[in-house]
Amino acid sequence: MAEPRCVSWLPSWADPGSLERASVGGDAPDGRYYGLRPAPGQWPGLGEGLRAAHESLRAMPVDRIVEAFDRTCSRWADHGFAHRVRARADIVAATGFSAQAVDHGLDVELSNYRAKTLYRVLRRELGDPGVLDGFTADRELGGHTMALGPRVTTAVCSGNVPGLPALSLVRALLVKSAVILKVASGEPTFAVHFLRSLAEVDPALADAVVVTYWPSQDTATLRGAMEQADAVIAYGGDDACAAVRAHLRPHQRYVEHGHKVSVGVLTGDYLADVGLREVAGRVAEDVSTFNQHACVAPLAYLVESRDPSPRDVAEALARAMAEYAADCPLGLLSSTDAAALQLRRANMAWAAASSPGGGFWRSAGLDWTVTLAPDLLSVQGAGNRTVGVVPVRDTRHILSELRPLADRLQNIGLGASGDRFWTLASALGRLGASRISEPGRMAGPSVVWRHDGMPCLSLLLRWCDIEMHPQARHRVKTPAKDEVTQA
Amino acid sequence: MSVHCATKRIAYRDTFVDELYEDIGRLVTGDAVDAHLVEARLRLLARTNSAATAAYWDHHEDGVGVPDSAYKASPPYLFPDREPVRVFETSNTTGTGTGRVAYTPRGMELMKTSIVRNAGARLLRGLAEPAVIRLVPSEQAAPRMIMAHGMEVIARRFGHARLSSCVLDGSGVDRHALRRLLGHAVAEERPVVLIGATSVFVNLCQSLREEGESWRLPSGSRLVDAGGHKRDRRVSVEETRAMAARVFGIEPRGHCNLFGMTELASQLYDGWDTAVGPLGERPKASEPFVRAQVRAPDDLSLLERGAGLLEVVDLCVLDRPCALLTGDWGLAHPAGVAVTGRVAKARQRGCSLALDQVTAERNDHG
């Protein structure tokens, strides 16, 4: 049996002796991975080191941080990049995703962190990215303003999307926060490879990050990690997020990405304009990316009962799913997940067989499943490329189908055009959607998007304004370094 | 034997059904009847009389059991020309609603034949008129509960009339009645057969133990637990046996687990006293008229060894498709198939949520 591998990243200043092993996925003797977590009583020391690392980050221009991510991710764009090759193999082993599905997921995820995109998100959320470096003139204020990130951010990641830990890392480091990154048992391996590659580009950035792991029931370690943080980012289901929330302290910044649901909408006009085959290919892309485990992936598409009919769409989608899987297969499922999927399929097949308007299509293996379902809430389960096509009559019907999901609604792939597009977009936004994109673009939201309807950089920040002071009227900008070194 | 090739629905009083019914009865009672042929005729009947079953088998794996969820949404019933005489309801142990399972008179008769045959061979062999004490409601109190019916059939056929009774009502186990029945059985040295749901038995044993109450039941007494633990903590077979020994003085070999479902007419009993499952689950004995089998999670092929989806093919089921995908894990072993728990819905990963989970949340919140 292979020796378990470490999924943690430690800064160069950290003392490995203060950490202990935590087997990923419990105490099973055949655990393939382990993480390092501080031994009892050791969190304060680690927190002190991270706060010192934060001071180094604060002295660093934001341009340098953007540049570091840009260079790192440009290297990851090369499928032969050594860290990517190792990460791909580890992610395949950890998740069962096919190598092609992992590659596609990493391309989607990491293309977000190039300089051009990062500056867009900085400008959109902060106006002038320079506010992160020091006081900047603010015309509306009639003074100056400066944005200060947390000294330390604790990010609790989920394991559903390979590469997703990079998002929390990027957001926190962009605002010059040191990071405690807790990886998930579902996919614990990506983060350490990314940190190694970041360290090769800019060691000071990687020196401000600890990648750690603890089992979900280890509330003492969770509490210890949160006590070191000024801000907390949490991904996961309701229970996981509730466990994090239970340890929040007053004045801690908190950004939560809990359970969400995404769906698509296809109007008759859109299908006629774009063409059935093309639309089906786009929907297959939405469903299949990340094997449908991301919350941005649609679980169903609402299709207007026009020509082509919802049944035509479902049949075309089945063909498109098969074509997609031929190039990019699902991968291997654990016997538990495979059994659950087979039961879901049997339930869906029976539902289709016993309903006059029903339909059921599937691959010979487990790669994909398409159903024609009578309504949205009868679409069963989530994940592993199983999508429902639901016939709808008109705009009112679309909204009535989606209304029960309003609290959980996130991403809509909206296939509509002209006035109809704006009517539907407005109604869907009011209903609860936080992102609307064209079909085929659902799975790759930009980091510029206000994720789950929140300005995720801004939520981490504290601002300091200077107003009503004669000094501030004359000063244009002060370099961050002066401010920091004299503080 | 009449041959039926047309796609026209087969009537309840059709010769095809008459002969099939007779042959199933003979198969159960041990006559030389070709079980494969009976199964083929049952499948033809299901295909012909249920468009949904035919479509399901055409668009899914041909012949794979109908999922138990079918009985919640649109239950298959093969004889619309014959009003059901009984309808049983599923227990909602998975929290996804109650299913309905309808029986014709012939369906009821075949179920009774199967229950009596199997219980006589597997459960009550060597016992003459034991006290059959049931930890279930009476059939009168729970007419839609198939376990109440099945145990009543066993008690009436095999049990001592005066000492056999149900001791479970709406407020729990009737301790007074239990003490009275056990007391008489002990005094008369009449063996006791305790039958009930696993969870009811375990809870009863725990509270009796805490209260310091126990019996030493006459030699040959038996415990039959059914249903396993679908929601509660799961208790191993050895723990169950230890409780039965401590509280009732029942020897380990007097314990037997029974697998039954509302959707099935027959019951499956432990066949070999060999621990196969992770909690010591024993392999179930297949009979010519009912068998448990295991389908591979990746391609639904039948497994000779290993874990997969439990399917039961029950040739005593006349009124609906005879093959059922139960939603349980089965562990195939040379000695038989052990039932090792329910198949969980797929893991929710991270922030993604299933649509039917939204429905469940809404139901949970009223």
Image (spheres, coloured by chain):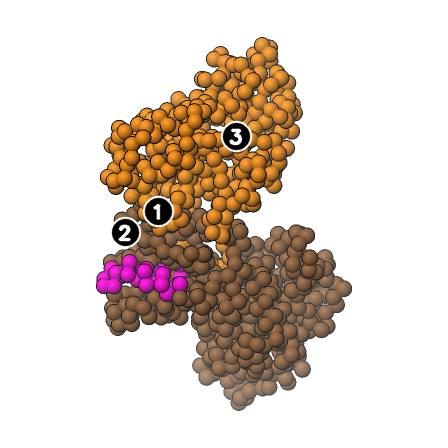
Chain colours: A brown, B orange
* Marks 1 and 3 close (CB-CB < 8 Å): no
Q: Are marks 3 and 2 on the same chain?
A: no
Q: Residue at x 53, y 34 (%)?
A: B284
- Assess disc 3: are there few (<14), some (14-19) or many (≥20) residues with their C-alpha within 10 Å of its C-alpha: many
Q: Are marks 2 and 1 on the same chain?
A: no
Q: Nearer the viewer, mark 2 or mark 1?
A: 1
Where residue A456 appears, x then y in whole percent?
A: 50, 69
Secondary structure beneath label 2: loop
Say if the magenta span includes residue A289. no
Do we see residue B160 in this rendering?
Answer: yes
Q: Residue at x 43, y 50 (%)?
A: A344
User: Identity of the amino acid at label 3?
Assistant: Tyr
Which residue in the structure is indicated by mark 2?
A357
Asked if residue B102 is positioned above or below residue A161 in the image, the reply reads above
- Assess disc 1: are there few (<14), some (14-19) or many (≥20) residues with their C-alpha within 10 Å of its C-alpha: many
Q: Nearer the viewer, mark 3 or mark 2?
A: 3
Where residue A138 appears, x then y in whole percent?
A: 48, 82
User: Identity of the amino acid at label 2?
Assistant: Gly
Label 1 or label 3, whichever comes before in sequence order? 1
**Quadrant (top left, top right, bottom left, bottom right) of the C terminus of chain B:** top left
Q: Residue at x 52, y 30 (%)?
A: B269
Which residue in the structure is indicated by mark 3?
B269
User: Identity of the amino acid at label 1?
Assistant: Tyr
Which residue in the structure is indicated by mark 1?
B56
